[in-house]
Amino acid sequence: MAAELDFSPPEVPEPTFLENVLRYGLFFGAIFQLICVLAIILPISKSHKTDSDNFEFKSSEMVKKPKVAAPQLSKKPKKETKKKR
């Protein structure tokens, strides 16, 4: 019986080009996601904060300016109709 058992390693075919592209693409995607998560978690440098503060100040100035209402010519007065009995 011992002669009948085959303990040699199984034959594994070489990965195809598409399988290699998929494998390395998944690795790069995982690394990119880790970098994005770390960028959110880690604090931002102070030089970047001053730029964003200036941007927030400018955007708040734009919000404070009164907007001119555009005339609406498409609205027509509604006609009142009487109910017929």
Image (cartoon, rainbow, N blue to C red):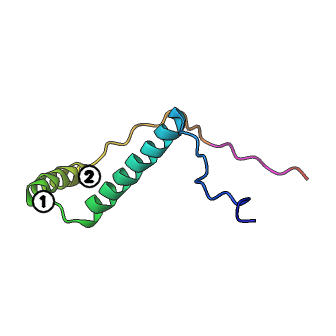
Name the foreground residue: 28 vs 35: 28
Residue 15 sits above or below residue 51 on the image = above
How far across and down, in percent of the image, does residue 46 sit? 9, 60
Q: Earlier in the sequence, mark 2 or mark 1?
A: 1
- In this view of the protein, which residue sits in the foreground, 49 or 66? 49
Per the image, is 81 magenta?
yes
Residue identified by numbered label 2 = 63
The residue under label 1 is which amino acid type?
Answer: Ser
Label 2, label 1: how many angstroms apart (C-alpha)? 27 Å
Is residue 4 shown above or below 76?
below
Mark 1: which secondary structure? Answer: loop
Name the chief secondary structure element in magenta.
loop
Crowding at label 1, few (<14), some or many (≥20) Cα neighbours within 10 Å? few
Q: Secondary structure at mark 2?
A: helix
Q: Residues within 10 Å of mark 2 (few under 14, many from 20)?
A: few
Residue type for callout 2: Val
Q: Residue at x 41, y 49 (%)?
A: 27
Would residue 3 be found to the left or right of residue 8 on screen?
right
Please identify, in this view, whether the residue under mark 2 or under mark 1 is nearer the observer: 1
Which one is in front, 38 or 55? Answer: 38
Q: Which mark is residue 45?
A: 1
Please say if 80 is above or below 75.
below
Figure quadrant of residue 8: bottom right
Q: Is residue 70 left or right of residue 45?
A: right
From which residue to which does the magenta span run? 78-83
Residue nearer the viewer, 25 or 40? 25
Q: Position of residue 44 (x, y in %)?
A: 17, 61
